Amino acid sequence: MIAFTGHGIDRADHIRSDSAKLAELRGGGAGLVLQLDGLSPVYGEDNTLQFAPLEADSDAELVFLGLRGEVPLYVAVPSVGDTRPAYEQRAQWALLGLLPPAELALYGGARSLADWHARHRFCAKCGALTVLAKGGWQRDCPACNAQHFPRTDPVAIMLVEHDGDLLLGRSARFPARSYSALAGFVEPGESVEEAVAREVFEEAGVRAHSVRYVASQPWPFPSQLMLGCHALADARELVIDYTELEDARWFTRAEVADALANGPDAASFLAPPRYAIAHSLLEWWMEKTP
Ligand SMILES: [Zn+2]
């Protein structure tokens, strides 16, 4: 299972646009609100998410996450969103691995939404204050009637293969000895396949082809959709862009196997953590190429 997927609750889209039903659920006394500290989860004793009963007279800005059985789940929009760069959050990401997979997925989606609301209170078209709409899956501008929708930003992340070896790279911000799949945002006017080829050439100077999609992962820091791909390289010579990467090199199948099997004790390199799709892609590759 890929981390941050499979929360298993009913998103209940038909309720989002039914304001009477939303009000009935909100006042019905059965609702539960996901407990966050800023945007981080509040962990219970058994490392599960914590919920508090929704108070009927609450005037909090709430996002309706969906139904768990008959129980409506919500998350409150915090006063401020997340402004920290991603690399400052690695310690927090490691803690998230403690959550059961379904809860991690629920938290991830809730975090992305709550953060988006907190950072998009003003209309991008006219600058007026916007209001939460459609149960929190939209914001509307009362001044110009513009509708704004939660962002999902596509990122291509790719395993590039040549003659049975894999190209992996590391940023200077990675933990020591850690290598991972190259990645980059898909740009406007570009297919995923084109983004893969462009990023691999920009970062490592390698021409890639035969791009195929493997799997995807929502990544809630803040709202990426990681599109995991595999591609073949024309040649092995690397021209590394040192403004993007500290290093990139080819790894043998045995080195990847060592990294996945031995974690921090691996002699070859430190594999990406289990909650990252790069880890899942490496596992997929090992199964694919016996
Ligand atoms: Zn507006």
Image (spheres, rainbow, N blue to C red):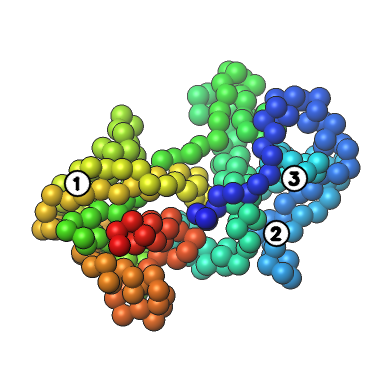
Find out whether the residues at labels 1 and 3 contact each other: C-beta distance under 8 Å: no
Of all residues, the one furthest to the top in this rendering is 144
Q: Amino acid at mark 3?
A: Arg
Q: Which mark is residue 49?
A: 2
Secondary structure of residue under mark 2:
loop
Which residue is rendered at x = 28% and y = 72% of the image? 255
Vertically, is 150 above or below 46? above
Which quarter of the rendered picture does the C terminus lie within?
bottom left
Judged left or right of residue 239, residue 167 is: right
Judged left or right of residue 118, residue 233 is: left
Query: 210 or 90: which is nearer to us?
Result: 210
Judged left or right of residue 149, residue 259 is: left
**Label 3 sits on residue:** 68
Question: Which quadrant holds residue 51?
Answer: bottom right
Q: Which mark is residue 208?
A: 1
Which residue is rendered at x = 65% and y = 47% of the image? 8
Which of marks 1 and 2 precedes in the sequence? 2
**Dot 1 beta carbon under 8 Å from ligand 1:** no
Which of marks 2 and 3 precedes in the sequence? 2
Which of marks 3 and 1 precedes in the sequence? 3
Which residue is rendered at x = 70% and y = 63% of the image? 48
For marks 3 and 2, give the CA distance: 14 Å
Q: Amino acid at mark 2?
A: Leu
Query: 74 or 70: which is nearer to us?
Result: 70
